[in-house]
Each structure stands twice: as structure tokens, then as C-alpha cells.
Image (cartoon, rainbow, N blue to C red):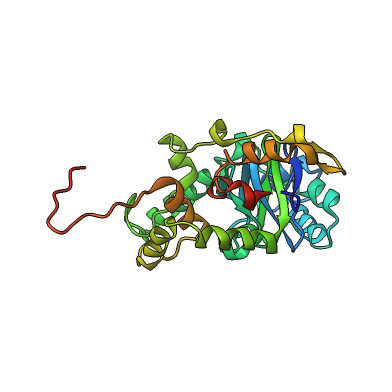
Amino acid sequence: MKKTDLRVIHKHNLLFLEPDQCAIIINGNLNLFSHKEDVATPILQAIYNPGDIIGNKSIDGGNSRDTHSWIIAYKDCDILLMNIEYCDYLWDKMKSSSDKNYIAKKMQACPWLMHLTEQSIYTLAYDLLFYKKFDMDQKICP
Amino acid sequence: MEKIHVPEDDDPQDELYIDPATKRNEGVSTHIMYVRALCHREVKNYSVALESYARVMKREEEISDYEKMIEKKNFKELTLKTVDGPGFPGWRIDIYSHFKREKLLKENNRLMMVNLRDYYTWKEGWHQDQVQNIIKDLQRVRFFNRFDRETLY
């Protein structure tokens, strides 16, 4: 907690991050636009919600750090700023301290999910899926 | 008498055509404003980068511009018969508009949002005597709810 700072991104302002910083949203939304395909007509690539990590390449696959990516707040948005190293420490701790990690590892091994970013995989594993083991020949009633 | 062709500004094929975004930027093209924003962001001149990007920025009511653009591309390719139609390989869709129509977006979902401003003084940081409350609130937010109190302290 002591290693983080609170920052407000005001309406119609941009998120600018230093190379060693990353941000986690705690209140509001941020929108990631990419100008890669057409400078004048950017594509909305992501809507970040509370809990989403921005600016850490190893977690989001570098989408938020791309040269042509711009992150806009359409309403005031609160973020927690932290050092990337501290974020990595938290991320590693999360991965090593929960059995949800088992689901994430299984998903990463799936050919149709292996291209998702680590952040997406762990969001699915922690917040949207749950793991249940069945015995052989056991009847499964959805 | 032969009629002299006078270029019209509202014809996109015309070399003197000025698009609405350029008109809005007092004659400076969107591309130039974008490059200006990129350069100033690169040298960490964030206020000028923001000022330049604000002229390129898509506002909430303009987000569907991208969908209109790919619609044009789709119809162009359809007339050239390089794609067979909606749903066939090469037919583009705008995921954002699709999700919006299907009501699958959860923008401004306040379920996990917390307000930590009461515990923070600008330039001074967190109120040390209230760290316990901050952590309690923070644990309502996704990602932070994966840690115990000691880790977040």
C-alpha cells in the first residue's frame, strides 16, 4: 500500500505512464484506442475496469505500451500507480499462492486460449471460472 | 462557352477537399496533429501531447466512426468480389459496436469501484492511521481481492 500512489485521470485526459510505472484502476473506466490501422479513425481496443493492470508488458502483452496506443478517460477515473517491479512481485505472489493457478495453467496449455494475455487468463481463472473435479463415470448434471 | 471546372471543397475526390477534422483544426490535418502528439509524448512533454491529441481524440459520440470506416471497406471489397459477404472470411466486424448492441459491455459497473480519495492527501500520500480501512476497501476491487491483508500492507 505504501508503495502506491493515488492519481485521478480527469475527463477527456490521457493516461501517461513513465517506463517504470504501471497503473491499476480502482474507480472508473479507461479506454484504449489504437491508431495503428488508421491515424484519423482509431479502433477502440479495450475498456479497462477496476482491477485491470495497465502498462506492464509481461501481463498485458504490451497492448497498453504500444506506440500507437492512447488511453483516454471519458469520466474521472482513479488509478493506483506503482512501480512495475512491485506489480511483478504482487503478480508472482498471486500466482504462487492460490489453487486458481491450476486453472490458469490448464488454460494456457489449451491451443485456442494460449494467445490470450496473462491478464485475461488470470481474470478468467479467478473471476469467471471455477474448477470442479469429477470421478470417472460420474454423471454430470449442468 | 465551355464551363470552367471549379474545385468544390465538399467533394472528397477533389484535391482541394478539406475533411471536417482538418477544418476543425484550423487547416492542420489530423495526421500532423497526431504526429505532434506522438513526438511530445515521446519527450514527456505531456501537456502539449494532450493538447495535440485532443484534436484527434475520439469522443464518446464518435466511437462508431470506426464501424462506419470498416463498413465502407467491406462494401468496397464486396463490389470487387474479394469477399463473399457477412460471416465469410475477410468480412470485418467492429467488436466494440457488436458488444454494445448485444449489451455485453460492462462500462461504469460500480460493483467493484472504491473511493480511496478520503484516505489520501495530495503530495503527502496515504493517511498512515487509516491504512487498515484503505486495505479493507481495496480488497473489494478485482485483483486486490486475491491477496490477504498482510500482503497489501
Residue A1 placement, left or right of A93: right
Tell me how many marks there are: 0
* Residue B36 can be seen, yes or no: yes
* Quadrant position of the C terminus of chain A in the picture: top left
Compared to residue A28, the image places residue A51 above or below, namely below
Q: Is residue B105 left or right of residue A57?
A: left
**Residue A113 seen in this snapshot:** no
- Residue A28 % position (x, y): 63, 37
Q: Position of residue A116 (x, y in %)?
A: 46, 61
Q: Quadrant of residue A21?
A: bottom right
In the image: residue B140, left or right of residue B134:
left
Query: What residue lies at 72% left-to-right and 39% top-to-bottom?
Result: A12
Q: Is residue B62 above or below residue B34?
A: above
- Residue A67: x and y, percent? 68, 62
Q: Is residue B95 left or right of residue A141?
A: right
Q: Nearer the viewer, residue A12 or A7?
A: A7
Res. A85 image quadrant: bottom right
Is residue B29 placed above or below B122 in the rendered structure? Answer: below
Q: Residue at x 85, y 48 (%)?
A: B47
Of A118 and A69, nearer the camera is A118
The residue under the point 74% across, 50% down is A4
Residue at 59% in and 65% down? A58
List x then y, in percent, for residue B13: 61, 51
